[in-house]
Image: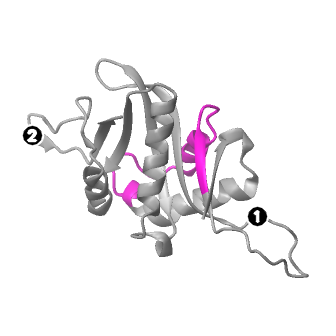
Amino acid sequence: FDISLKSASELTEQEFDACFDLIKTTSQHDYETSSFGWHVKRKKREMRESEMRYLLVRQGKRDCIDDDDKGDDPAVEAFLSFMLTHDSSPPIPVLYIYEIHLASGLRSCGLGTQLMTAAEHIASKVGVQMVMLTCFLSNVKAKSFYERRGYVKDVCSPEDRKTRERVVEVDYVIMSKAV
């Protein structure tokens, strides 16, 4: 695999569309059934934020070139997006992972771990001491994956809250890991 780092403004339309399609394919249902809701325009606006960075994963380029090869880069098959920001309680500088999505055939082969390790390495290199992310509680596999990597519920993660009539349960957790 080839992994490249790009800012949101450096993404080609094909790369942006591939990333959005991965989110749609892997997480649209989770968004739709959550308190976040599925909002295409809002998600695309977030994806284009000027500080957003992307680790894009493609199959390695072939060694031989076919006559009909136009030299196009292979399609994006996985990505991790992140932003350096302030979060947690009290607010501290963090690397916040916004999205990590892999095509179905690339799951459970170590690529997700490689992307997370790369993000943690970037955080360490720029002097940020914590990596954070948000995970839908309905995505049990993802939550387990993050926990195996040392992520724990952050102090700023919301709790269920009681009203007069009922308990309003949260449907996501904010997780963090010191790096």
- Identify the residue at horizontal 39%, vertical 36% (top origin): 131
> Marks 1 and 2: in contact by CB < 8 Å?
no
Residue 92 place in picture, x, y as percent:
38, 20
Residue 41 place in picture, x, y as percent:
59, 46
- Identify the residue at horizontal 48%, vertical 43% (top origin): 119
Give 40 or 62, whichever is nearer the viewer. Answer: 62
Which structural element holds mark 1? loop
As for residue 145 lying within the magenta part, the answer is no
Residue 119 has which mark? none
As for residue 32 lying within the magenta part, the answer is yes
**Image vertical order of residue 53 relative to residue 76, above or below:** above
- Pointer 1 local density, CA inside 10 Å: few below 14, some 14–19, many at least 20: few
Left or right, residue 166 beside residue 27: left
Give 163 or 174, whichever is nearer the viewer. Answer: 174
**Image vertical order of residue 54 relative to residue 122, above or below:** below
Residue 73 has which mark? 1
Give 9 or 74, whichever is nearer the viewer. Answer: 74
**Residue of label 2:** 165
Q: Amino acid at mark 2?
A: Glu
**Image vertical order of residue 134 relative to residue 12, above or below:** above
Q: Is residue 35 visible?
A: no
Left or right, residue 179 beside residue 126: left
Q: CA distance from mark 2 to mark 1?
A: 56 Å
- Identify the residue at horizontal 32%, vertical 26% (top origin): 88
Magenta stretch bounds: 30-56
- Identify the residue at horizontal 28%, vertical 44% (top origin): 151
- Pointer 2 local density, CA inside 10 Å: few below 14, some 14–19, many at least 20: few
Q: Is residue 130 visible?
A: yes
Q: Quadrant of residue 52?
A: top right
Residue 169 place in picture, x, y as percent:
18, 45
The quadrant of the picture occupied by the N terminus is bottom right
Tell me which colouring the rendered structure shows.
Answer: one colour
